Amino acid sequence: MRRKEPHGGSLAGQPLSKEQGRNCRKAADYRCASVGLQVETVSSSQDVHRVVLDSNVVLGLFWFQDPHLSRLAMALETGQLHWCITAQMCDELLHVMTRGDLAPSMDGAVAQDAAIRAERVMAEVERLSQLVPLATSLATPRCTDPQDQMFIDLALGLGAKWLFSRDKAVLKLNRKAFALRGCSIISPQDWRP
C-alpha cells in the first residue's frame, strides 16, 4: 500500500510501514463494513463540482425515479457533479428504505419488493457516489433537525458547491452556508447547471 496525498505531498508515493498500512485498511474496513463501499480521497481539482445529496433526494432519484430530478440524474451520470457520501449517510438511507415507511403494508410480497428496490438504490449509490470520511466544519450552522446535521457538516466541511435537499429545515440554512463556505443549499428541482 502506498501513501495517497493531495497536491503531490512530500510523502506521496512512498510505501507505508506494515503497521500504517494495517491501520489504514482497518479504518477503511470499519467505515465501509455496513455498505460495502470503498473509501477514496476527494479530488481537489477546481473543475470538479462536489455535491452532497440528502436522503430524500436520493430516494427521489432512485426509489421513486422522480422525473423532476432528471437534470440532476444526468449530471451525476455524466460526472458533471461529484457526489460525496459518508458511511453514516449510507446507513441512514438503508435504514429509511427498510423500516417500512416507503411500503406501508409490508406483507411478504411487498417486503420482498422493497428489499429488491433497496438493493437497487444502494447499487446506484455505490456506482455514482464517492464514499468519503466524515468532514466537519467548525463554523457549521446548526439544523433544527439533528438527523440532517450530517449533510450540512459534510457539505461545508468538504467545500461542496451544492447541498441538494427537499427538507425545509435544511433549505433555510442556505444563506448562512453560502456566506460561510460558498455552498448553496437548494432543492434539486431549482438547480440549473
Image (cartoon, rainbow, N blue to C red):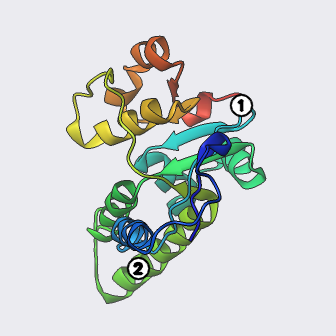
Distance from label 1 to label 2 (Cα)?
39 Å
The image shows residue 58 at horizontal and vertical percentages of 50, 52
Determine whether, in the image, residue 118 is placed left or right of residue 146: right
Residue 3: image x %, image y %?
Answer: 57, 59
The quarter of the image holding the C terminus is top right
At x 34% / y 63%, what residue is drawn? 91
- As drawn, the residue found furthest toward the bottom would be 108
Residue at the image position 70 percent from the left and 38 percent from the top: 48
**In this picture, is 101 found above or below 47?**
below
Task: Name the residue beneath numbered marker 1.
Answer: 46
Residue 102 is at least partly visible in this image: no
User: Which is closer to the viewer, label 1 or label 2?
Assistant: 1
Q: Position of residue 83 (x, y in %)?
A: 58, 48
- Amino acid type shown at disc 2: Ala
Q: Which residue is mark 2?
A: 115
Figure disc tally? 2
What kind of element bears circle 2?
Answer: helix
Q: Nearer the viewer, residue 10 or 167?
A: 10
